[in-house]
Amino acid sequence: MTPKNRFKLLNGLSRTILRLSKRTRQRTISNIKRAMPYLRSTEAYALAIESYACVVSGVLDTFWLNELEIEYEFDQKTKNILYSGKGAVIATLHMNCYETVPLAIQQLTGRSTTLSKLPENFPLVANNYQQAEIECIDKNQPNSLFKLISALQKNRIVTLHADHYANDIEMEFFEQKTKAPSGAALLSSLGNAPLLLGYSVKLNDARYRVYFETISDSPLGKDKQLHKEYMNKLYRRFEQIILDFPNQWYWSYNRWR
């Protein structure tokens, strides 16, 4: 199938799935209203359907990574870090196609490493990363953190999804109390690497624009309070990005618990 026909098929199918999945649909709409309480119920429902369709089609794009067209945007400071030949940590979000950021890094630098859950009985997922020449470390492995640190020591650029729920750090996200992971800050500290932000915006059927920003141009050190400050700074940017592109973020996740 062409990317255009694939997008049309998945777009329609995902909309049907969400309409039939009551619990997922209710959680999605509830999360949208938490973040944007000013939306009417009809607007929140329409956004739930649109965002779910975008993410489903984006997730399926991971099976055709080498067919995707990627554009890049970054400032001079961030460009210097990416092309320095040294390691870096990139925090990203669950938006559209989850692997466009590590794909962009591989195309730009040839030194891309990411962390993902690799299903044991579905080797095709791992093959997708191999074909795109992205080093993928299995999150299910108990030594995954040490492998990420080792990748940084080899001057690779590591991408982590940082917008999910975890018990590490207490914070507010869209003025709602929750908890978040500290993995990106911890890895910057342990791997002696700068901390960046990366996210992608879907432009059309198989075309994405990936943005990179610098959060800290130097390693964060061992101060846990500093880790918390930078993760809060990162999450403020997450909020802005999500509000700019609400139809491309994965609202269905149980983010506030």
Image (cartoon, helix red, strand yellow):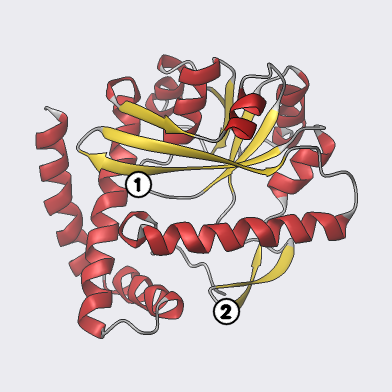
* Residue that mark 1 sits on: 96
Q: Which amino acid, by three-letter code, is at mark 1?
A: Asn
Q: Secondary structure at mark 1?
A: loop
Which percent across, then down, holds residue 225? 85, 60
* Residue drawn 28% across the image and 58% down it: 52
Q: Is residue 74 visible?
A: yes
Whether residue 243 sits left or right of residue 85 in the image: it is left
Residue 200 versus residue 131 in the image, above or below:
below
> Mark 2: which secondary structure?
strand
x%, y% of residue 13? 15, 52
Is the Cβ of the residue at disc 2 closer than 8 Å to that at disc 1? no
Which residue does the image show at 70% across and 30% down from the upper left? Answer: 148
Residue at the far front in the pictured view = 76
Residue 56 shown left or right of residue 176 in the figure: left
Name the image quarter holding the N terminus: top left
Q: Residues within 10 Å of mark 2 (few under 14, many from 20)?
A: few
Q: Position of residue 9 (x, y in %)?
A: 11, 44
Name the residue: 66% across, 21% down: 156
Q: Is residue 231 left or right of residue 59?
A: right
How many labels, in total?
2
Q: Which residue is mark 2?
A: 176
Determine crowd level at label 1: few under 14, some 14-19, many 20+ residues with C-alpha closer than 10 A.
Answer: many
Check disc 2 and give the amino acid type.
Answer: Gln
